[in-house]
Amino acid sequence: MRVSVIIPTHNEAQAIGRVLADIPSDLITEVVVVDSNSSDGTPEIAASMGAQVIQEPRRGYGQACLTGLAAADAPDIVVFLDGDYSDRPAELPILLQPIIQGDADIALGSRLGQQRIRAALPWHQAFGNRFAAGLIRLLYGLRITDLGPFRAGRADVLRTLALEETTYGWAVEMIVKGAVNGFRVVEVPVSYYPRIGKSKIGGTLKGTIGAAWFILSLTVRYYFRHRKMRNPAISVSES
């Protein structure tokens, strides 16, 4: 199978080398680093280690992921991974296993299992993830615990989902669209460590609130959009 790994980055020079060094080369066909205006040498480090580097000046986490997905070279499976070394690329076999075995279409790495180092995920992020996961369970019937960035999906499934979210709402778009389209979304436990460098989301109040808004609003908005598509008689006021 052809497996492409997509890594969005912004000023991750301290971590990107360790991330790339830990990716199991025997499992991966290509690594695409999508860099957003880094000023610390991140793209140069990534290129020197053999990654394909794409510059994406448009802002947004989802935008970087979409750009990487469009650039991937005919993959069978696409993996999304952050460049801060909080998730460990060496655990890629754990993430890929349910897809390779034919038991899943999308695999999510859950950071909230017993392997988690508690200090790695601040309490407000852990709470927000559990809250969002609970909302998804309530609205979509999908039992998940986390919306972590370490995830993989069959390339044909991702094309079918027509992903388009350019903000941090990307964290839920793949999940909720997968659920309503009947694809198999499963979780696997992964370890999680304190990130290298300052977080662009959890490290600031503005980032935390912004990410929470995009995630929760998209979860609810897409539910009512899908409900309306299934039942055109539902009025605009209800949706």
Image: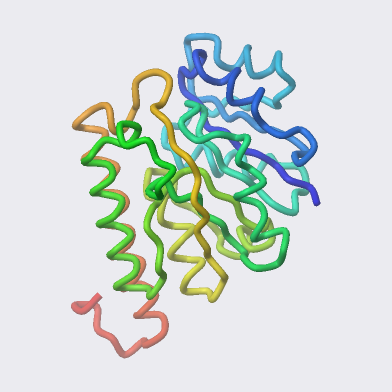
Report the residue that reaches farthest toward the bottom: 233
Q: Residue 70: where, in percent of width, then height?
A: 65, 44
Vertical side of 68 occupied by 173: above or below? below
Please name the colour scheme applied to the rendered image: rainbow
Q: Quadrant of the C terminus?
A: bottom left
Residue under the point 51% across and 44% down: 150
Observer-nearest residue: 232 or 34?
34
**On the picture, is 239 further left or further right than 113?**
left
Q: Residue 6: where, in percent of width, then height?
A: 61, 38
Vertical side of 149 occupied by 231: above or below? below
Observer-nearest residue: 116 or 99?
116
In this rendering, the count of numbered labels is: 0
Q: Residue 2: where, in percent of width, then height?
A: 79, 47
Vertical side of 217 occupied by 9: above or below? above
Report the residue that reaches farthest toward the top: 40
Observer-nearest residue: 212 or 131?
131
Give the quarter of the image for residue 156: bottom right
Residue under the point 55% across and 38% down: 81
**On the picture, is 78 further left or further right than 147?**
right
Q: Residue 9: where, in percent of width, then height?
A: 51, 26
Residue under the point 38% across and 75% down: 141
Residue under the point 70% across and 67% down: 102
